[in-house]
Image: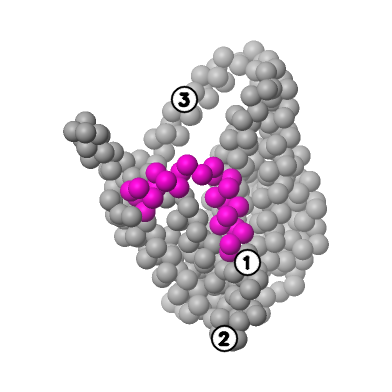
């Protein structure tokens, strides 16, 4: 049901306020519909554009479209998931809310506030990260591509907050009173059990392949913070090395450091990573080195991602057997 064109969209979907409003609403109302919109939009773009006429077209136009598709994936998949995780972590700490309806209303309000906040951050970041869509194809960025993000972001926040509030109220107030509530509860338990097995598909993928995939995505996205492709490639290579080291079994990021850093609450670690990255970006333009000052935003963003890897290390299950044996010997 994804149309071939949206009102106002000519070069990229961010030119259409209607498409962005539909995207932010579907992503939080239903994860399935959000993923379906992402996949359908990607297929439609691939079929409607002549990107296979030559190798150069595939490299340049295809790379730009991939960046746009990744940014859309962040909006309709990653941000709703992040919003749900933050909201659930917050509501579990509000133990003084004993009544079910009161907890459901507070959860819905939190869901709306958090989702609107992360959508605002996406709008601010996308105005810069959309640059590779045009630079990869050799065109200057158009004003229309960011006009909606910079001028109509309030409407997007309203759509995001309204959809999140509706999802929370239906899920917490309406659904438990429906005659199908026992079936909904059973399906919810099955979904939670399946979520625990969702990452099993990646177990057979080598660490170097996963690190290369992460580095490639970071390089494509961060190339929007610089006018030079080599800067984005350097950031991707750095993130590839860091990601590969962070996934090494029995490494310094998966051993004692992982246990130590998990003592600190996740919200504090998020604030620390974002705050340090912001300070670095703000201070670098004052340095005497011109090449560092010109890349202050790129270096700050790369440092922020690196801090997230360091402060949120993977819980390496391969360490647990050795720890159990050592504890029994002790």
- Precedes in sequence: disc 1 or disc 3: 3
Q: Residue furthest left?
A: 329
Q: How is the image coloured?
A: one colour
- Precedes in sequence: disc 3 or disc 2: 3
**Residue 288 against residue 173 in the figure, above or below:** below
Label tally: 3
- Pointer 3 residue: 190
Whether tag 1 and tag 2 are in contact, CB under 8 A, the answer is no
The numbered dot on residue 279 is 1
The x and y percentages for residue 326 are: 22, 37
Q: Is residue 65 visible?
A: no
Whether residue 222 sits left or right of residue 87 in the image: it is: left
Q: Give the range drawn in magenta.
A: 253-277
Question: Which corner quadrant of the image does residue 34 belong to?
Answer: top right
Decide: few, some or many residues near mark 1? Use Cα within 10 Å; few <14, some 14-19, many ≥20. Answer: few
Decide: few, some or many residues near mark 3? Use Cα within 10 Å; few <14, some 14-19, many ≥20. Answer: few
The x and y percentages for residue 32 are: 56, 39
Q: How far apart are marks 1 and 2 (CA)?
A: 17 Å
The x and y percentages for residue 252 are: 33, 55
- Pointer 2 residue: 289
Query: What secondary structure is found at the residue carrying circle 2?
Result: loop
Query: What secondary structure is found at the residue carrying circle 1?
Result: helix
Q: Distance between the residues labelled 3 and 2?
A: 56 Å
Q: Which residue is nearer to you in this view: 227 or 61?
A: 227
């Amino acid at each position: 049901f994804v149309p071939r064109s949206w009102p106002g969209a000519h070069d990229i979907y961010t030119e259409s306020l209607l498409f962005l409003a539909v995207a932010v609403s579907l992503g939080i109302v239903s994860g399935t519909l959000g993923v379906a919109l992402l996949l359908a939009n990607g297929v439609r773009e691939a079929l409607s554009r002549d990107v296979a006429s030559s190798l150069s077209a595939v490299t340049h136009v295809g790379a730009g479209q991939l960046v746009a598709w990744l940014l859309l994936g962040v909006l309709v998949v990653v941000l709703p998931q992040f919003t749900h995780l933050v909201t659930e972590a917050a509501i579990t700490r509000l133990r003084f809310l004993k009544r079910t309806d009161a907890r459901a209303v507070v959860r819905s309000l939190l869901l709306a506030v958090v989702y609107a906040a992360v959508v605002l951050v996406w709008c601010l970041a996308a105005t810069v990260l959309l640059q590779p869509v045009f630079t990869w194809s050799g065109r200057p960025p158009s004003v229309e591509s960011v006009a909606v993000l910079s001028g109509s972001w309030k409407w997007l926040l309203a759509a995001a907050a309204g959809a999140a509030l509706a999802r929370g109220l239906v899920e917490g107030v309406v659904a438990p009173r429906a005659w199908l509530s026992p079936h909904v509860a059973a399906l919810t338990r099955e979904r939670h059990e399946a979520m625990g097995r969702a990452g099993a598909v990646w177990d057979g993928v080598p660490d170097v392949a996963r690190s290369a995939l992460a580095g490639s995505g970071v390089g494509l996205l961060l190339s929007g913070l610089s006018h030079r492709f080599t800067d984005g490639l350097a950031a991707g290579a750095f993130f590839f090395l860091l990601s590969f080291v962070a996934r090494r079994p029995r490494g310094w990021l998966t051993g004692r450091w992982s246990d130590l850093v998990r003592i600190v609450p996740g919200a504090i670690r998020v604030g620390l990573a974002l705050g340090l990255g912001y300070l670095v970006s703000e201070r670098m333009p004052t340095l005497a080195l011109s090449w560092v000052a010109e890349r202050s935003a790129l270096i700050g963003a790369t440092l922020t991602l690196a801090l997230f890897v360091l402060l949120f290390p993977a819980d390496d299950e391969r360490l647990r057997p050795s720890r159990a044996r050592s504890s029994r010997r002790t």
